[in-house]
Image: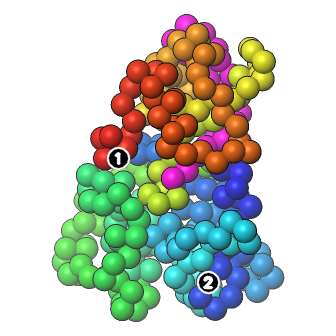
Amino acid sequence: MKDLQDLAIGATDGTIGDVKNLYFDDDAWVIRYLVVETGSWLSSRKVLISPIAAGTADWSTKLLPVSLTREQVKNSPIIDSDKPVSRQQEMDYMGYYGYPYYWGGAGFWGEGASPGVLMSGYSSLGVGQSLEQPEVAAADATAHHDDDPHLRSCKAVRGYHIHASDGDIGHLQGLIVDMETWAIRYIIVDTSNWWLGHQVLIPPQWIQEVSWADGKVSVNLTRQAVKDAPHYDAAAALDRKQESRIYEHYGRPGYWESGE
């Protein structure tokens, strides 16, 4: 999460600004929007950028390119990023950029696993145009107008208390995001309150309940299982071998085995 918040966002014709926060879907545990603070060119206004437009991040320069122009961003719907984002605002946003809705399918993004599938076939359209017939789009908008988009701030959840089935185990230090699907693969748990200060990774699928009002996350693991789990080293790259060790420790199949 910290690395993502350090990224600059580059449009096709110049820099847009820097990532200051991210909104994730607390139902699917997927990043839905980057909150980007623009520079002086747009009076430092905060705008939302969907991973649908994102390219491949260049970590050496800390730049994430997006398939948008600065003019598109400038004229995009104004959404107050300090307030909850409604489904209607999402519809306006998607309609403006000509994106299909990401909700309603079996995948993370519609019927697909990656946000790029929602961009396919849309690049030739103008701003605000959609492949959907007007009648279909109108019916869809009416049906989902009052849906809860389940969007949460990544910044806000940092520091949440983590509870095992038999007691406290630490606090949420950060999130690890799969940049291909933008799925949150792990929450980083800092156990320094209880043990020797190491960090461990827990997949969000093992979360039983989140009390947003109290800032508490309950997981269906024991304290001992978490204590004995492989330590996470933020300075080292997380590869499939290390991920396998985590799942093997808990005796559970990896997400890659189920095609997630």
Horizontal side, residue 151 vs residue 171: left or right: left
Mark 2 or 1, which is nearer the eye?
1
Residue on which the image places disc 2? 11
Outermost residue toward the top in this view:
166
Q: Is residue 171 magenta?
A: yes
Query: Residue most toward the front?
Result: 241
**SS label for mark 2:** strand
Q: Earlier in the sequence, mark 2 or mark 1?
A: 2
Cα distance, mark 2 to mark 1? 30 Å
Q: Describe residue 219's horizontal placement relative to residue 100 as left or right.
A: right
One can see residue 192 in this view: yes
Give residue 34's position: percent from left, percent from top: 59, 63
Residue 160, can we see it? no
Circle 2 residues within 10 Å: few <14, some 14–19, many ≥20: many
Q: Identify which amino acid the numbered label 1 is placed on.
A: Glu
Residue visible at 35% across and 71% down in the picture: 118
Please, is residue 30 above or below residue 98 in the view?
above
Mark 1 element type:
loop
Look at the picture and state if 107 lies above or below 225: below
Three-letter code, disc 2: Ala
**50 or 62: which is nearer to us?**
62
Asked if residue 136 lies left or right of residue 220, the reply is: left
| Position in image of residue 6 (x %, y %) | 74, 61
Rendered residue at 51%/68% (across/down)? 50
Find the magenta span and give its range. Answer: 155-178
| Residue in the image at 36% along x and 54% along y | 108
The residue singled out by tag 1 in the image is: 260
